[in-house]
Amino acid sequence: MPFQIFAIDQKDCEKMIIEGVEAMNKKDFTKSLQILTKTRKIAQDNKWYREEFLATNNIGANYYMRLDYGEALNNYLDAYKIAVAHLDEKSEMTVLNNIAILYSRDRKTEKAEDYFLKAYELAGQVNNNISKGLYAINLTIVSNEKKDYKTAKKYIDEALKLTLDSPYYLLARSTYVETLVNLKQFDEAEKISTELLPKLNGVEHSEYKTQIFYNLSTIAEQKNDLQKSFHYLKLAEASNLNYDFKENIFEKFSNLYKQKNNIERAVSYKDSIMVIKDSVNKIKNGQLFENSKIKFELQNSQKNLAESQEKLTTERSLFIKGILLAIFVFIIVFWALRNSIVKNKQQKIIEQSNAEIAKLELEKEKKNKEILENQLKEKEVLALLEEEKYKNEIEAKNRKLTTKALQLTTKIELIDDLVKTLSRQTDDFENQDVSNIIKQLKIFQRQSREEESFFIHFEEVNQGFISKIKTLHPDLNSNDIRFLSYVYMNLSMKEISSLLSITTEACRKRKERIIKKMEQDDNLDLYDYITSL
């Protein structure tokens, strides 16, 4: 082994990285990680920063493809440090794009858009059109998620031009199809999909192929062709290798079966969605992911501070050189003119020099003050990061509570549909067996709605919220407090009305009545108000 290591040069390292990436593309993650980890160690020992960066970045890509986002972000963070310290803008924008993709997967759309945009701008600065095209595709995907379809169309049009002769062109075309579907340009989207499908062969194109079939299913559904929609959705499920995307496919299956009045299959797929969510949450190693994001934000802050300190160091150096130059000039002038200038003239020159030095000292004090201000800002950033970490923990617990509430809502809605279906499809309304079934379903509905464990769990997660509301607004009763708790969890009026067993209109009126009880303006945004308490 020692002789092999000494015999390896940078070209050998590059070949090993290529071999590791090829194994990753073939989904042989164990082999890929073994090769890339060994390559990174060799590069670290020899201080080959470029090869160390590529190996670390692709190790992160391996974990990303395995849905271990926490470990992926740790490796991307290490790659980012190497890029900033030793490499160029191209490397920096590459890892920024990878980090943005992780934020996108974690449903942090605004954060993802920020880092995609940074990578996109860096690619423009270095005139790397292919990378710029890729980042434009990613910005298109984020804009589609935000339902900003006009912006999405702008980015994808640019991406199609920039990636025309690149490996990313198929991705650009697939993303273009999704954008056309969102814009309801179904005929054009269907035409392009038919052209693309024969080209999407192999494991590396499975994600594009799945998305095309999913979009074709959506188009068929919009055209009320449920049989065709089911056909394409089953093809999407067969080609899908992305565990995250299963949730979207099962959600569409549930909706399609609901449209066909097959309540049993609809419920089955709804339950499958909950299982997928639980599995994905375990795989993603959520806490490690949140910690890594905080470390990345801190790294960004430290980078900006380091750049500011470097600038101040340069200015100090110029300041000292200026003083030395001034002194040197003063001595030459003094000795050249000492025999011809009177004492008063000499004194005047000395006073002017002293005034200049005093001015420079004031500037020095100003620079020192700026350094102190930057240090205070850094402390504020750290405090904000701690606060954000706490908020994220609260949000994670509220998401679990919301999931339970939504599961209850879904069950109630499905039972409502079943009761209505039984009532509508039964010719003999006096049938005693059917009446007994409907009564039992209604009793189950009431029991589901009357579960009082909600307040206990809610108060554990959001300590002090209920007592604070009662203190500020003592006129509110327990039903009002329950309503405000659902609003605090960011549930929609439809979801709240289902949980409270009232109509959506009655739910809105209750909201208006509560705002009046709280003696607030009629135009008050209730969610913003209670979350700011």
Image: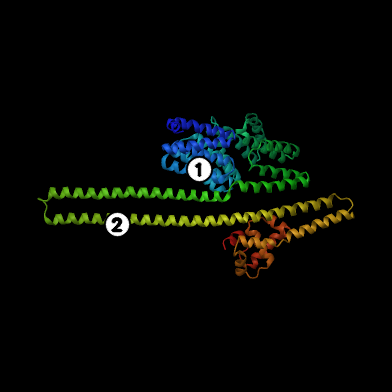
Q: To which quarter of the image does residue 136 belong?
A: top right
Q: Which mark is residue 463?
A: none
Query: Badge 1 is on which residue?
Result: 76
Amino acid tagged 1:
Tyr
Out of 455 and 374, give the one closest to the viewer.
455
Query: Badge 2 is on which residue?
Result: 362
Out of 149 and 326, give the one closest to the viewer.
326
Amino acid tagged 2:
Leu
Neighbours of disc 1 within 10 Å: few (<14), some (14-19), many (20+) = many
Q: Residue at x 53, y 36 (%)?
A: 34
Q: Is residue 439 left or right of residue 488?
A: right
Q: Earlier in the sequence, mark 2 or mark 1?
A: 1
Q: Is residue 311 left or right of residue 232?
A: left
Which quarter of the figure is the C terminus placed in? bottom right
Indicate the position of residue 14 as horizontal and vertical percent values.
47, 32
Out of 341 and 353, give the one closest to the viewer.
353
Indicate the position of residue 333 as horizontal and vertical percent values.
16, 48
